[in-house]
Amino acid sequence: MTPFIAACIKANEEIKEAIQDGFDASWFEKTEVGAGGDMSSKLDLMAEAIFVKYLGSFGQIESEESGIIGEGEAKIIIDPIDGSANALSLFPFYGTSVAKINEEGLLDAAIVCNLGNSDIFFTTVADGIQQGKLFSPTFHTPHTAPHAEVGLFEKAYANPTLVALLDQEKLKFRAPGAIALSLAYARSVNYVLYMGSFRIYDFAAGLALCEGLEVIVEEDYVIVSKEKAIALKIESLIKSI
């Protein structure tokens, strides 16, 4: 495990400790529009401050909340709370995502954490893709469900025509509302689908965890699946609309 990944894990553990006994009332307050275009909550800013404390020495941070923070040749892209709306609704599918771009412009580390259940996923050149739990020293290759019955469709609410087509093809899905987390679980579901414009904060870390899977990235959709036939079938449905 690299020092960067170890620091990311420590940051996530501190955030988890902060929230495990319930949310402070102030965290539900919205402050201002963040760099990613959404309103930042004080929960987002609390998590961001913890990441800055642990990761600031590794390079310049680009956060969905505050934009550019600090200096350095490497760039660290963070979404302090992935699935903020879920978190602020106390729906336990939310987490964090971090991606590190090195001095050569290549992604050399990524980590996604589900703060709801403490699942954590990371990838580096040396370690490959690993899965574990916060506060545990044990990591392993990610769990895979070979006959998964559901996919994950982010932004399903904005795409009713495609929802109907997926239903006709019996491609069941859930829409949990946190894209980095959904991508982190791509090996244990039938597919992950995102429709709409997207930002680097949402995808940098999550897509890095999908190496070795069938991945289709276009301007207005992303499809990931263990099976090429499933990915191509979904793409054909999109193109038929």
Image (spheres, helix red, strand yellow):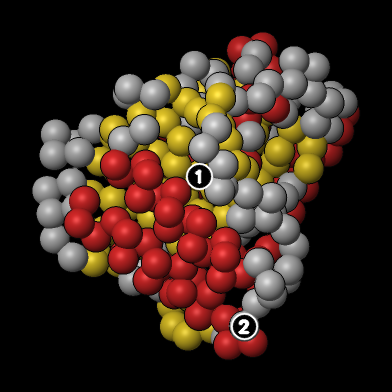
Horizontal arrangement in the rendering, residue 234 relative to residue 18 (left or right): right
Q: Which mark is residue 112?
A: 1
Q: Which mark is residue 210?
A: none
Residue 203 lies, in percent from the top left, at 46, 43
Query: Mark 1 falls on what kind of element?
Result: strand
Q: Position of residue 211 (x, y in %)?
A: 46, 22
Q: Position of residue 74 (x, y in %)?
A: 18, 46
Q: Quadrant of the C terminus?
A: top right
Task: Determine the residue positioned at 74% across, 21% down.
Answer: 145
* Amino acid at pointer 2: Asp
The residue lying at 68 percent from left, 55 percent from top is 116
Query: Can the viewer see residue 47 in this picture?
Result: yes
Say which label, 1 or 2, has the lower sequence index.
Answer: 2
Q: Residue at x 32, y 24 (%)?
A: 125
Q: Secondary structure at mark 2?
A: loop
CA distance separating discs 1 and 2:
23 Å
Which disc, if any, is residue 24?
2
